[in-house]
Image (cartoon, grey):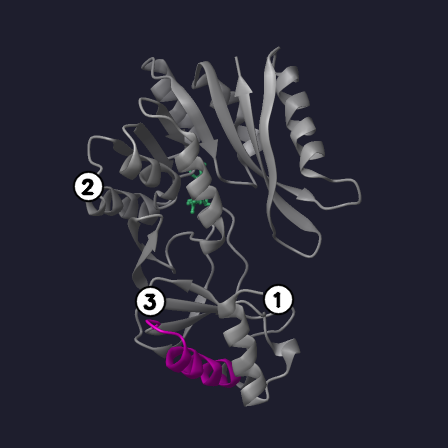
């Protein structure tokens, strides 16, 4: 349990709120805090009253938090956003969130965000080398695209279908002064990738941080890879006995062999986080030559 989650649990205990009413995680993005409710509880007035009391305490106890929201739905299909109710503090859902020395303006109600991808963003920025070109097919507000460009001399192409994510991508490119290194595109990743390929653009890294769809975009992603390049695939898998990161990596290897690749090297596999009672989000990095 993180320090922030511990604060939330302490608040609930101090207010006499039953653990069953609480999803025991406190997400902080910039000066905005997000509470979630257990999925099986409908958002009644009574429940909201409880969450409002907790939210007031969060503002008192967590430094820099100015606004607290309740996420009351799972993430939607395409834009991967949730629905929110305002709980306490300033009624503002836009914030600036800092990660790995870069700043990201975003509105929690309009775009996807997850502080839990922090490690992945840092790993990727360390892994790419100066001079390389990156294609991010599902960029959101730009973490995987902008952080490497803040640190290294890379060219980063970032695509997102959500118009709000695209607008924040443009804002964040300016905010981090990486114009001329990061290029934003609005639209479907398959279509824009095909256009880039038809313009003879090739990439040393293609990253696909959209676990629900990455596999179905594999055939177009491999077209964009340079002669030797890395694919970074995020995917969900049911966590059954025997589902290890290596097994997940092996299943990706088989898919790529079926697509006609002969030289498939699994560079890294990792369980990024659990995303449901029995589901895990995994990442597999593959080198294809
Ligand atoms: C999980 S989020 C990306 C997370 C982001 N890379 C990060 O590190 O926070 C997936 C993103 O894919 C975008 N998306 C969904 N379908 C898409 C498509 N067909 N083409 C391009 N982007 C798409 C969504 O709008 C969303 O921003």
Q: Is residue 48 above or below residue 252?
A: below
Indicate which disc, 1 or 3, sits on the residue closer to the N terminus: 3
Q: Could you say which quadrant of the image residue 225 lies in? A: top left
The answer to if 62 sits in the magenta stretch is yes
Marks counted in the figure total: 3
Name the residue located 54 percent from the left edge and 33 percent from the top edge: 233
Q: Is residue 168 above or below residue 128?
A: below
Residue closer to the observer: 21 or 76:
21
Name the residue located 33 percent from the left edge and 67 percent from the top edge: 31
Q: Which residues are magenta?
A: 49-65
Residue 136 at least partly seen: yes
Give the SS element for disc 3. loop
Indicate which disc, 1 or 2, sits on the residue closer to the N terminus: 1
Give the SS element for disc 1. loop
**Dot 2 alpha-carbon crowd within 10 angstroms: few under 14, some 14 to 19, many 20 or more:** some
Give the SS element for disc 2. loop
Q: Gap in Å between the C-alphas at discs 1 and 2?
A: 40 Å
- Which residue matches tag 1? 39
Res. 31 mark: 3
Res. 177 mark: 2
Q: Gap in Å between the C-alphas at discs 2 and 3?
A: 22 Å
Q: Quadrant of ligand 1?
A: top left
Q: Residue 13, image x and y in percent? A: 58, 84
């Amino acid at each position: 349990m993180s320090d922030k989650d511990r604060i939330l649990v302490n608040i609930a205990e101090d207010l006499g709120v039953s653990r069953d009413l609480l999803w025991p995680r406190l997400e902080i993005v910039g000066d905005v805090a997000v509470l979630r409710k257990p999925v099986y509880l409908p958002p009644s007035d009574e429940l909201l009253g409880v969450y409002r009391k907790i939210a007031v305490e969060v503002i008192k106890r967590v430094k820099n938090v100015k606004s607290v929201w309740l996420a009351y739905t799972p993430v939607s299909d395409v834009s991967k956003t949730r629905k929110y109710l305002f709980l306490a503090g300033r009624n503002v859902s836009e914030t600036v969130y800092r990660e790995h020395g870069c700043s990201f303006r975003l509105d929690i109600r309009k775009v996807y965000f997850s502080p839990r991808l922090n490690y992945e963003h840092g790993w990727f920025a360390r892994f790419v080398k100066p001079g390389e070109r990156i294609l991010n097919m599902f960029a959101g507000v730009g973490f995987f695209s902008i952080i490497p460009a803040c640190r290294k001399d890379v060219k980063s192409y970032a695509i997102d279908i959500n118009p709000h994510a695209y607008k924040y991508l443009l804002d964040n490119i300016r905010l981090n002064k990486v114009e001329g290194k990061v290029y934003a595109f609005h639209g479907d990743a398959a279509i824009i990738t095909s256009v880039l390929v038809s313009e003879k653009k090739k990439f040393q890294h293609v990253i696909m941080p959209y676990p629900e769809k990455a596999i179905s975009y594999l055939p177009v992603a491999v077209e964009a890879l340079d002669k030797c390049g890395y694919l970074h695939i995020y995917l969900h898998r049911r966590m059954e006995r025997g589902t290890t990161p290596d097994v997940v990596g092996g299943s990706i290897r088989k898919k790529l062999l079926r697509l006609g690749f002969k030289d498939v090297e699994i560079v890294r596999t990792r369980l990024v986080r659990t995303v449901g009672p029995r589901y895990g989000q995994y990442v597999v990095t593959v080198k294809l030559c």
